[in-house]
Structures are given as structure tokens and as C-alpha cells.
Image (tube, coloured by chain):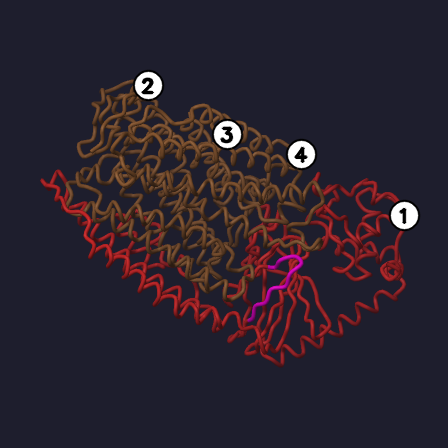
Chain colours: A red, B brown
Amino acid sequence: MRVHAQRVGALLGGLLFPALSMADWTVNMTPGVTGTSNDIFDLHMTIFWICVAIGAVVFGIMFWSIFAHRKSQGAKPANFHENTMVEVLWTLIPLVILVIMAIPATATLIDMYDTTESDIDIKVTGYQWKWQYEYINEDFGYFSNLTTPSDQIRNRQAKGENYLLEVDKPMVIPVGKKVRFLLTANDVIHSWWVPDFGVKKDAIPGFINEAWTRVDKPGTYRGQCTELCGKDHGFMPVVVKAVPEEEYNTWVADQKAAAEKERELTQKDWTMEELMERGKTAYATACAACHQADGSGAPPAFPALRGSAIATGDMAAHIDVVVNGVSGTAMQAFGGQLNEADLAAIITYERNAWGNKMGDMVTPKEIFDYKNQQ
Amino acid sequence: MYLIFSFTMFLLGGTMAMVIRAELFQPGLQIVQPEFFNQMTTMHGLIMVFGAVMPAFVGLANWMIPLMIGAPDMALPRMNNWSFWLLPCAFLILVSTLFMEGGAPNFGWTFYAPLSTTYGPPSTTFFIFAIHIMGVSSIMGAINVIATVLNMRAPGMTLMKMPMFVWTWLITAFLLIAVMPVLAGVVTMMLMDINFGTSFFNAAGGGDPVLFQHVFWFFGHPEVYIMILPAFGAISQIIPAFSRKRLFGYASMVYATGAIALLSFLVWAHHMFTVGVPLAGQLFFMYATLLIAVPTGVKVFNWVATMFRGSLTLEAPMLFAIAFVILFSIGGFSGLMLAIAPADFQYHDTYFVVAHFHYVLVPGAIFGIFASAYFWLPKWTGYMYDETLAKTHFWLSFVGMNLAFFPMHFLGLAGMPRRIPDYALQFADFNMVSSIGAFMFGATQLLFLLIVVKCARGGVKAPAKPWEGAEGLEWEVPSPAPYHTFTTPPDVK
């Protein structure tokens, strides 16, 4: 693409000089770390050079006409028009070029659609505005949230190296294995993209899309949601860590154990302080994006919780809203997204923070029972 | 009237683009909140497409088609009046949503469900109503063009003798009649989903969010050609005029236009390569999209062949026309790249796409409109415009436009998604360049206003035919063209 810039830049009389003078500015796609992304890169470069060639010929003739056949140069207009031979030729030649181009593109596409015989299946679910990764054969899953602090976004703090492209828990996959992604969404359409893998697929609520990758090189790869999904569309990055297989296996074992521990949390006896403390953290990751850290919300789409009828009213109604969501609004059903401990902590926190003084609490066990009787 | 309205909307939509570029000038959130940013991108798109480009071409059609085919006026004046006055009403409603509770539509000009239905702001219903009114207006405008062209041509003017602008508008009008009802249908389905409990686009009720995209793009892709074909026509008249040479292949131009229009109905899913279309569908839409390059190529080759061995002069309309050919071709090239389905998985919904369609629509549609405006201003006002100012307007627009949109290719290839109010640090430099270019392009357009006002108020009297190489009936009446020209039809040989 840098060459493109130079060529077009030259054609436009050097008008695009900023693009040329600073050579360290990235101007091209990167080949990536998977077979697919390399195939795509090759296709990209081929079609790019074809365009450059066509452009050079067509614009070349055009500029020559502009310079040589000007009235001020004493040019007399010729009077030729309509030449069947030429017209047939300039229809057929592009057609042939396109056919040549379509053949490798078709092959790559067929390969990209072959999601069979995968080693690992991961279900990817888009939420406003985070990703959930479920390792469906391993029986655990988690959410991946943006960790860039709001102070950096609001320019109150220097921006970090991976500004807006960092999460608390990245997806982890082993290198050299065929990983299949099953993509869906919980609310609106999202799109899961990791440029280095050459994988981009829409996550559509109510439907499951498939994509796959096989990563050659260990590393951390970053991407973003690419389908406008509302207010924080620009703030839901995708981070994938590709690790060697042994490391992956240890990680899976750890995750399974942690998931087991989480389940045990439900049975534990909680005090008000413990719930408030857990609730503050859990609220910040799960609720604050809409209802804001201070509970002020962003009406009318996202109502305030401070002093609201729900958070300072009947406990059962409050639990119902959080667990089951409110249909027809942006309020999601968090019952399936969060574990009982977090749900109980968040509800308790909402009833007792920012000047809400209900003084009551709900335990994870009660939430567990509430969910089960539904 | 249309042209004044359209220019007002162009400035309004442009102001919104300035807000967008100002926010994107640096990483971090400085000026606006993400909610408002999304409203700006949505309104910018809607206003530019439906408020600026389409009415501008309808305006050109109303003024020029009767002159070109030797008719006294458009066939259906009352409907014309209706069609115009609906537009300010529609846009009043649309713009008023900015001041409603919950804000204006914030789901992009493509308003994908369910973001625009279940998750849309309360103002969405007003937005749907506005779209309906615009649709009615466009259809009436299109019917008027067809009626005029088919019934009111001067004796002797056979279809294959019509000027290219008339041809492309005739084809555009048929496209409009074919797809505007589809748009009306899709927004009606949204209306039902939002207010009457249906589930066209809600999987939980047995619907399908992707259905929305299929229906929308069945309208959306021909819509792109609705915005570009009239420009093709105008350029096909301006280039021969300033080359002092006949258009190289008139017949092949007409057929190419027809072919583009027909193919435009068969390529809609290339906007949806990542939604999970089955492999066979994916291949079909890739091949069909590549095929469109052939008639488009024929057009570009024709323009170049027309210039070849002509006798060129470079007045403002010609400058805009040449820039049109070059920059539109660059937009065409990136379109060809996007058509390669596997590669599109990387390009899709990134700034590469933003660069692509701005290269098609700004130098395509907008430069086409500027070229036409300068070409026919002497005929409209009776005075010559200020050539020096017009050339300044061209060069500033040209530089600003490229500075604004060319770096977007790089941003997209480096992985910046579109429609984000804030971005990772590696995208900072090119975004700044792009914003500077956009401010330059935006400010330059005030110059155009000045030139037109100055021209309308007086200056050097324009002869009936101010351009040496121009051909057509419109140059045979005095400038400015009298009210109700050609009350007795001229004879065309």
C-alpha cells in the first residue's frame, strides 16, 4: 500500500506527501499468523497490483492526452468515434482478468468455510459491550471486559501502550490446533475480528455462525468489535492469547478448578461487608457501562439507580429485574451471565450504595433458590 | 429550489462530518460523548444521501432535462411541486429528532436491526416517518422524469439521440421506482416491530435480524447507483464539450449504464460477506460484483478515449470532470478489492470501506454535481461565473478531499473499525491528517456558495453557448433560459 501511495501520490502531483514522508506509518495490511490470513494477504496484494497496473495504463493515457492534446498546445480535435474492435477488447480483457482473479479467491473462500474436524470449540457471545467465551467441551466460560481506565479515555491520564485494546481475561487458545468459533450474540449484532487471524464473523442474536483458525505463532493478538452495536461499540476489544499446548492444558485445568470454586461460593455464608465489597467490583464490570459508576445512569435508555424505585423498593422485584432483565429495553437478563455470588453482591450493593440505604441484603443461596424455582 | 435545499443540507451534513472528524482528531474522548458521536455518523450519512446528493440530481434533472429534449417544462408540474415540498417536511422531522428525549437515531445510516428496533431510541418512529416521506418524494420525482422523457421529446429526438444525462436519469428513475418501495417496506417492518409487537427482525419471535440486511441492501446497492449514474451522464457530456470531440462510444455508454443498473440488483449481499451467507451464495455475489467492473470499466475507457486526441481546455467543469474520472476510478479499484470475498473479511466494516465509499461518493456524486453546476451556471443565471475563484474551489476541494479520505485506506488496512468515537494509539497520526483534510474540504465549500451568489448577481454576460465544444439543445436558447422554453418543439435531425 505504501507503493500505492507513492504511485498515486506521484500521479496527484505529490499532493499526498504526508503519507510518504513518514515511512514508519503503517500503510498496508499485515500478513498475520495463520494460513488463512496469509492467503488473504496474497489475494490482497495480487488484486492491488492488478489495480495498479490498470490504473497506470488508463491514467497514463489520460494524462498524456491532457498534456499533449491541449488546445493551448495547438491540438486539433480528431473526429474518430466508435470502434467495435476496441470496444470488444476493452470488455473482454477486464473479464479475463476478473476470471483469473476469481479462481484463487474461490479456493481461499472454500477453505475458510471448512469448519469441520476442529480440535477445540469455543462459543463466542457478543454482549453490549463485552465478549463471553465459553469452552463448551471443558465446561467453563467467562467474560472478557475492557480494562482501559476511564481516566485514560477522558484524557485525565496518559494513555497506555494497548489503549482500548486490553481486556481483563483474554481468550486463550493453543497454537497449531484447529480452533472452531461458534459465534452468537445476546442483544444486537456484533462482529468478532482478529486481523492477525484473518477471522471476522458477525455475531447475530438467535443464530450461530461458524469460523475457524489455526495459529502458527504464540503471542497476544488484538482486534475489535466491527459491527456498530451501540454506545460503547468502540470499547469492546477482542484479545486472544495463543500459547503452546502444554501451557494451554495447564490453563484449562486451572480454569476448571476456578469454576468449581466459584460454584462453591454460592454455598458460603456471606456478611454484608463481604457482599458490598464484591458488589462494588462486580458492579463496575457488569453494570457501570450503562448505569454509571455513581448510579446516575444515562436516561432515558439507562435509568438512574440512585434513589430509583427498583433499587429502593421491593427486594423480589429488584432480583427479578437483574436476573431476568426487562424485555423490550436495553436491560439484559444477567441471570445467565453472572454467578450467584456476583448477582447477590450487585443487588446488595445497589440497595446500599450512593445514598441508597435499604440496609437489607440478599445471599447467593437465595439467588440460587430464586433461579431454581423459575 | 431543489438545488438550494440540497446545498443547505450539504452544509448541515458537512457540519456533522466536521464534528466527527474533530472528535477523531486525537485519541480519547474530547468533544462529544459516544452516544452523540453515533447520532452524528447516522445523521451525516442520512442527510448526505437523502438530503444532499439525491435532491441535487433531481434539481439538475428538473432544470436540464426539458432543455435537453426540447420540452417547455417537466410533464407533471403539480406533482413536481409536491415532490419538492415533501422534502423540507421530511428533513424537519429528521433533524428535530436531535432535540428529542433519547436523542436522534444512533444506529448508523444503514440502521441494522435489532439495534434500530428493540434497542433503538424513542425517536426511531419519527425517523421512519421521515424516510417514508422522502421515499414518496423520490418516487414522484422519478415518475415525473420518466413521463417527461418518454412523452415530451422534440420530434426527431429518438431515444438513441438523447443526451447521456437524459439517458442516465431515465435509467436512474426506473431504479428509484424499483427500490424506493423496498426501503419503505423495510422501514414499515421496523415500525411494526417497534410499535405493534411483530417480530420480523427478532429471532426470539421467529424473525431474523439478517433478513433486515437482505432487504435493506436490496434497496441500498441500487441506491448507490442512483447517486452515481446521473453524475456519469453529466460527465459524459462535459468531457466531450471540453475535448471538442464527440463522445467515443455513445451506444456502448448507454448499454453500459443499463448493464450497471441491472447488475446492481444482483449484488446486494456483497455488503454482507461476514454475516454467514452460505458458501454458494457467497461465491455468486462475489462473481456478480466482479462483473460490475466490466461495464464500469467500459465507461472509464470511453471517457479516456474521448479525451484522447481531442483539443482540451481545462475550465472548472472540466477540472472537476477529470478529477471525477481519476478519483472515481480509485474508488472503483478499492471496490474491486472489496469484491474479493476472502479479502473482504479483512476489509469489512473498517476504514478501508469508509475510504472506498467516500472516494465513490465525494469525487463521484459531489464532484459530478459541481462539474454540472459550473457547466450550466451560465445557462441558469445568464452570467459567467468567476473562473479564478472556481479553479481555487476545485484545487482546495481536490487537495482537501484526498487528504481527508486517502489516509483512511491505510487506517482500514491497519485494522481500525468504522463508527468508533475513539481509537487505539497506532491510528492517531493518520486520523489527524484525515481530520485536517476534512476541515479544509469543508471550509472550501463556502467558497462555492460565494461563487454561485456572485454569478447570480451579475458579471460578464453569457452567450447562448458559452462553451466552444458543447453540444445539445440547451445551448440553442439564450442564457438565461427563458421561462417555458421550446413552446414550439424544435426539430432534431
Residue B130 in the image: state x and y as whole percent: 57, 34
- The mark nearer the N terminus, 3 or 2, is 3
Which portion, as a residue range, is magenta?
A203-212
**How many numbered markers are drawn?**
4
Residue type, mark 2 in image:
Tyr
Residue A32 in the image: state x and y as whole percent: 47, 68
Residue A302 in the image: state x and y as whole percent: 71, 43
Q: Residues within 10 Å of mark 1 (few under 14, many from 20)?
A: few
The chain letter for the residue carrying disc 1 is: A
Residue type, mark 1 in image:
Gly
Between circles 4 and 1, the one closer to the viewer is 4
* Residue for badge 1: A359
Asked if the residue at tag 3 contacts the one at tag 4, i.e. Cβ–Cβ closer than 8 Å, the answer is: no
- The mark nearer the N terminus, 4 or 3, is 3
Cα–Cα gap, marks 3 and 1: 57 Å
Q: Residues within 10 Å of mark 4 (few under 14, many from 20)?
A: few
Cα–Cα gap, marks 2 and 1: 81 Å
Residue B282 in the image: state x and y as whole percent: 49, 63
Cα–Cα gap, marks 4 and 3: 24 Å
Q: Which circle marks residue B101 in the picture?
A: 4
Callouts 4 and 2 on one subunit: yes
Callouts 3 and 2 on one subunit: yes
The chain letter for the residue carrying disc 2 is: B
Q: Which circle marks residue B483 in the picture?
A: 2
The chain letter for the residue carrying disc 4 is: B
| In the displayed structure image, the side of residue B259 where residue A334 appears, left or right | right
Asked if the residue at tag 1 contacts the one at tag 3, i.e. Cβ–Cβ closer than 8 Å, the answer is: no
**The image quarter in which residue A54 lies:** bottom left
Q: Residues within 10 Å of mark 3 (few under 14, many from 20)?
A: many
Callouts 3 and 1 on one subunit: no
Is disc 3 placed on a helix, strand or loop? helix
**The image quarter in which residue A51 lies:** bottom left
